[in-house]
Image: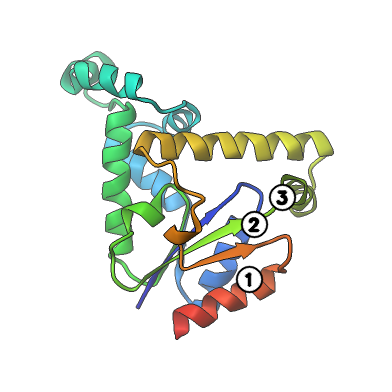
Amino acid sequence: MAVITISRQFGAGGRTLGQMVAEKLNYKFLDDAVIQELSKRIRVTKESITEMEDIAGGLFSKIVSAMISRGYMERLAGESSGYIDEVIYVEKLREVVTDLAKQDNVVLLGRGSQFILAERENTYHFLLVASKEQRIRFMQRRYNLSDNKAYNEVLGGEKRRKNVYAKMGCTNYNDPETYHMVLNMGRLTLEQAMGQIVSLVKK
């Protein structure tokens, strides 16, 4: 019974590898589940969650959010709709990731799960890295994208990743000491990386 978190530089193959590891270990792969559960608990659309992740985090926006009454904003939105800001996003993200991890035998992709679950027993954290050129090529091959589209996807994904960690106040997300293992996907195949993760977790 274990929990695996996979963090990655965008385009390093985290989603693909996460699915492979989950299938190999007969675990649940919980990527979209985080967004779905956030949407449900905050009572906003999934698009609102992803839009929040596109906005850069920072102290000023957190102060402004804290100054505005959540109840007041929810009344403006209507009873059937919720309200999301950075404070609510981070609060609910920690709650959702913690609750999903309680299922055990799950693989969680990104969204600060390695920090939220840092002290959880029997939880393994992995970071995938690769050069920007390698990540762009991976996106081209995997999703049949043009050069320009793959480049923009990698840049956009890295921006969202940086924004999520900024909201959480985390700046050391690429620090290798945070993880059980760092995998250079420019030097490993997906199958080799999967073997490394599965071997460590099984032991």
Disc 1 crowd rating (10 Å Cα; few below 14, some 14-19, many 20+) is many
Q: Secondary structure at mark 1?
A: helix
Q: Secondary structure at mark 3?
A: loop
How far is disc 2 from disc 3 in space, using C-alphas? 12 Å
The residue at which mark 3 appears reads as 131
Q: Which amino acid, mark 2? A: Gly
**Residue 96 percent location from the top left of the image:** 30, 50
How far is disc 1 from disc 3 in space, using C-alphas? 16 Å
Q: Pick whichever, 88 or 118, lies toward us.
A: 118
Q: Which amino acid, mark 3? A: Ser
The residue at which mark 1 appears reads as 193
**Residue 76 percent location from the top left of the image:** 24, 13
Query: In this image, 154 relative to 128: left or right?
Result: right
Residue 75, placed above or below residue 86: above
Q: Secondary structure at mark 2?
A: loop
Evaluate whether residue 200 shows in this view.
yes
Q: Which amino acid, mark 1? A: Ala
